[in-house]
Amino acid sequence: MKVSNIVFTFAASFLLVQANPTTVLKREQIVCSGQVTVSETFIGAESNVKLAQVYCPENTVPALSPRQDNGTALDVCGATCNTNCFTPSGGGPNPDDCSVIADAMRFYSQNVNDTFTIGTGTNNTVVLTYSTCETFYVNQDPVEQSYCYSDWASIVDYIAPNCQSTQNAHGGNCVAADQQWFIQVQTNA
Ligand SMILES: *[C@@H]1O[C@H](CO)[C@@H](O)[C@H](O)[C@H]1NC(C)=O
Ligand SMILES: *[C@@H]1O[C@H](CO)[C@@H](O)[C@H](O)[C@H]1NC(C)=O
Ligand SMILES: *[C@@H]1O[C@H](CO)[C@@H](O)[C@H](O)[C@H]1NC(C)=O
C-alpha cells in the first residue's frame, strides 16, 4: 500500500499528537508473513483474549544501527504517537470486539501488571486477538522497550471506532512520534 493511500492523521485527545508525522510507517502492515507464535496465553476477566508473542522468519523491519544499550528497557509508556487510518473502506474489525481486547488489557493492567517489556524488532511482536479484532505492538528501537497496557487499551479504543467504513477505512495504526514503535489495530484474518 502506498503512502498516498493515507486518508488522514488525527489527534487522540489522550495523546499529545505531533504535527509533522513522517511517512515511513503510515502504511498497513501485516504482523509478518509466515509469523510463528512463540508463546500465547489468554487474558481478561473471561480469559478470552489471546495474548501472544510472535517472531517473523522474514523480518520486515529495516536493520537499525545498534546503539549503546545500558541494559535498562527504555520506558515509552505515555509517549506520543500519531494515528493513521488505512484505506479503503470496509472489512475492518468490529469495534465491539476491539473493546473486548481493550477491556482485557485494562483488567490485566489492574490485576497483573500494567508494564511489559518488549525486545527489539518484529521478532518480538506482541499480538492480542479477539474475534474479528487484532492489535499488535512492534518495537523498532534497537534496545528493549517497556510500555503499558493501559495506554495500549486507550489507543485501541480510539482507533477501532474511528478508522471504520464511515471514515473510508478498515483499521489503522499509531506510530510513535520518534518512529521507535507502533501499534496497529486491524482485522483478525
Ligand atoms: C539507560 O539509558 C536510558 C536511555 O538512554 C536512560 O534513560 C537511563 O537513565 C539509563 N539508565 C541507566 C541506569 O544509566
Ligand atoms: C511488571 O513488569 C515489569 C516489566 O516486565 C517488571 O519490571 C516489574 O517488576 C513487574 N511488576 C510486578 C509487580 O510484577
Ligand atoms: C528472528 O528469529 C528467528 C528465530 O529465532 C531467527 O532465525 C532470525 O534470524 C531472527 N531475525 C532477526 C532479524 O533477528
Image: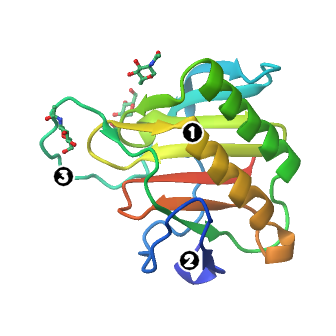
Image position of 69 with respect to 32: above or below = above
Ligand 3, seen in the image, is in the quarter at top left
Circle on res. 34: 1
| Residue 152: % across, % down | 59, 44
Whichever of labels 2 and 3 marks the residue nearer the N terminus, that label is 2
Image position of 22 with respect to 164: above or below = below
Q: Amino acid at mark 2?
A: Lys
Q: Amino acid at mark 1?
A: Gly
The residue pinned by badge 2 equals 2
Q: Amino acid at mark 3?
A: Ser
Please tell me how crowded label 2 is: few (under 14), some (14-19), or many (20+) other residues with Cα within 10 Å: few
Please tell me how crowded label 1 is: few (under 14), some (14-19), or many (20+) other residues with Cα within 10 Å: few
Circle on res. 105: none
| Residue 172: % across, % down | 66, 62
Residue drawn at the location 64% of the way across and 19% of the way down: 111
Quadrant the C terminus occupies: top right
Q: Is mark 3 within 8 Å of ligand 3?
A: no
Label 3 sits on a secondary structure element that is: loop
Q: Out of 157 and 36, give the one closest to the viewer.
A: 157
Look at the numbered discs 2 and 3 and tell me whether their residues touch, using CB distance below 8 Å. Answer: no
Q: Quadrant of residue 8?
A: bottom right
